[in-house]
């Protein structure tokens, strides 16, 4: 029951998957963007989404406020999957989490992480832009979320829904903004970093050094659009993922 609440098979496959793609969403985000990927994921790829405290069926749980307990929980739940061939995809805050999981997986299960995809995510050694969004008042944070996109206007206008969402966004945004250089070796898996051409948060300059965090081949790709390009450019993004995972 625990694993079911934490990990959702968004696109199961018959028999043993060729590889699993494990996905992590942005601060406050759910699994919706990744559910839409299911019909277009290459054959043999099982698509998994990770649900964190404060989201979906875990909405009554407090979000994590420190990185180590969060990474401990996620890698513990994903243990059986990380021991088999897999790739990791994370967007923004989820990109940071995907990188931390990749570091743990590389130490415990060498060679099983086939690729790390980080989208709209600065490198660990890139300073976070100021002012910190997590320090804003509720009203200003709400305005900032509206300006960045990613949250439907009907949700932003719903005081009850925002009362539930804002504490989760603030907690995960705090983790994302305070995240920095962490000790450890470079990843063995190749890294594909993607940034939005018009992203005012984590654009070309903030993502340029991702290849330095891998001992394998690395690449940085530009995507049309801003910070939230998961939906607007889904076909292009899935083509990139499919090609890197050996899909048709």
Image (tube, rainbow, N blue to C red):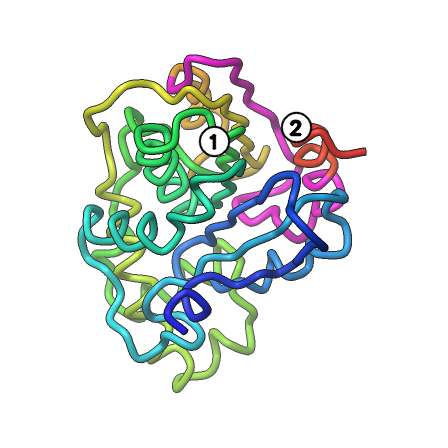
**Residue 65 higher or lower than 43, as above or below:** below
Judging depth in this view, the residue of 147 and 31 nearest the camera is 31
- Judge whether 52 appears above or below 47 on screen: below
Say if 134 sits above or below 114 in the image: below
Residue for point 28% across, 19% down: 185
Disc 2, SS:
helix
SS state under label 1:
loop
Please tell me which residue lies in front, 41 or 234.
Answer: 41
> Badge 2: few (under 14), some or many (20 or more) residues near its Cα, within 10 Å?
some
Q: Which residue is mark 2?
A: 244
Q: Residue 221's quadrant in the figure?
A: top right
Q: Which residue is mark 1?
A: 112
The magenta stretch is: 213-238
Q: Residue at x 36, y 56 (%)?
A: 77
Q: Is residue 41 above or below residue 162?
A: above
Mark earlier in primary sequence (2, 1): 1
Residue 248: image location, x then y, percent: 81, 33
């Amino acid at each position: 029951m625990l694993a079911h609440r934490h990990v959702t098979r968004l696109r199961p496959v018959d028999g043993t998957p060729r590889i699993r793609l494990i996905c992590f969403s942005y601060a406050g985000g759910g699994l919706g963007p990744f559910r839409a990927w299911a019909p277009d994921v290459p054959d043999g790829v099982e698509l998994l989404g990770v649900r964190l405290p404060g989201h979906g069926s875990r909405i009554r749980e407090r979000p994590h406020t420190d990185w180590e307990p969060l990474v401990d929980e996620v890698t513990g739940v994903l243990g059986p999957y990380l021991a088999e061939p897999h790739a990791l995809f994370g967007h923004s805050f989820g990109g940071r989490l995907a990188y931390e999981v990749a570091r743990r997986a590389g130490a415990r299960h060498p060679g099983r992480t086939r690729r790390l995809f980080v989208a709209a995510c600065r490198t660990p050694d890139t300073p976070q832009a100021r002012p910190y969004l997590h320090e804003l008042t509720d009203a200003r944070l709400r305005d900032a979320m509206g300006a960045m996109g990613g949250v439907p206007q009907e949700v932003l206008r719903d005081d009850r829904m925002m009362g539930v969402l804002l504490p989760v966004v603030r907690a995960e945004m705090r983790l994302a903004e305070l995240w920095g250089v962490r000790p450890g070796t470079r990843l063995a898996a190749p890294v594909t970093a993607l940034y939005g051409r018009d992203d005012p948060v984590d654009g070309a300059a903030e993502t340029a050094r991702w290849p330095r965090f891998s001992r394998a081949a690395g690449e940085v790709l530009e995507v049309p659009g801003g910070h939230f390009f998961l939906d607007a450019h889904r076909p292009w993004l899935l083509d990139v993922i499919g090609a890197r995972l050996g899909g048709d």
